Image (cartoon, grey):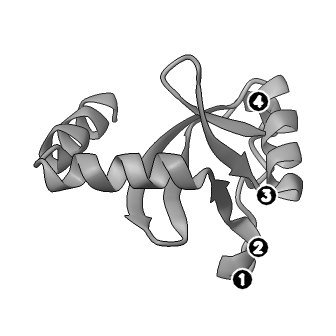
Amino acid sequence: MNVYYGDSEFIGQVERKMGKRLIQLMEGGNTYAAAIIGVNDQGISVIIRETFRHISRQNVCSFPNKSKDDNRVHMNESVARFMRDDESEGDDEALENDWADNE
């Protein structure tokens, strides 16, 4: 499962096993939202949240409990640099407001 900024800018991938699980759940009718929550030297941290669970998937957990390292999203370093540069210009508040508006 790939992660894109907007419609076309590739920024990374969800770990293979988790990505496969989420794709299956989306094909079954679940929907998800994602937001960038942090940028550091290792890359970008993204949070994925279930926004709708289809009735046929009511007893299926989207994110089973695992260690923190098992659900990492791997990001392109050039995007991490771009995001760090944007943060230094005070765009954090705009990103937070955009995420809050989508909740």
Amino acid type at image mark 1: Ser
Which x, y percent locates residue 33? 51, 36
Measure the alpha-carbon separation of dots 4 and 3. Answer: 16 Å
Which x, y percent locates residue 89? 13, 48
Instruction: Tell me, yes or no, if residue 92 can be seen here.
Output: yes
Location of mark 3 (residue): 15
Amino acid type at image mark 2: Asp
Amino acid type at image mark 3: Glu
Viewer-side residue, 96 vs 83 = 83
Measure the alpha-carbon separation of dots 1 and 4. Answer: 23 Å
Measure the alpha-carbon separation of dots 2 and 3. Answer: 8 Å
The label number, if any, that marks residue 67 in the structure image: 1
Asked where in the image residue 28 lies, by quadrant, the reply is: top right
N-terminal of the pair, mark 4 or mark 3, is 3
Identity of the residue drawn at 88% across and 35% down: 24
N-terminal of the pair, mark 2 or mark 3, is 3
Which x, y percent locates residue 39? 40, 62
Q: Nearer the viewer, mark 4 or mark 2?
A: 2
Q: Secondary structure at mark 4?
A: helix
Viewer-side residue, 70 vs 40 = 40
Measure the alpha-carbon separation of dots 3 and 1. Answer: 13 Å
Location of mark 2 (residue): 70
Left or right: 91, with 34 as reference point: left
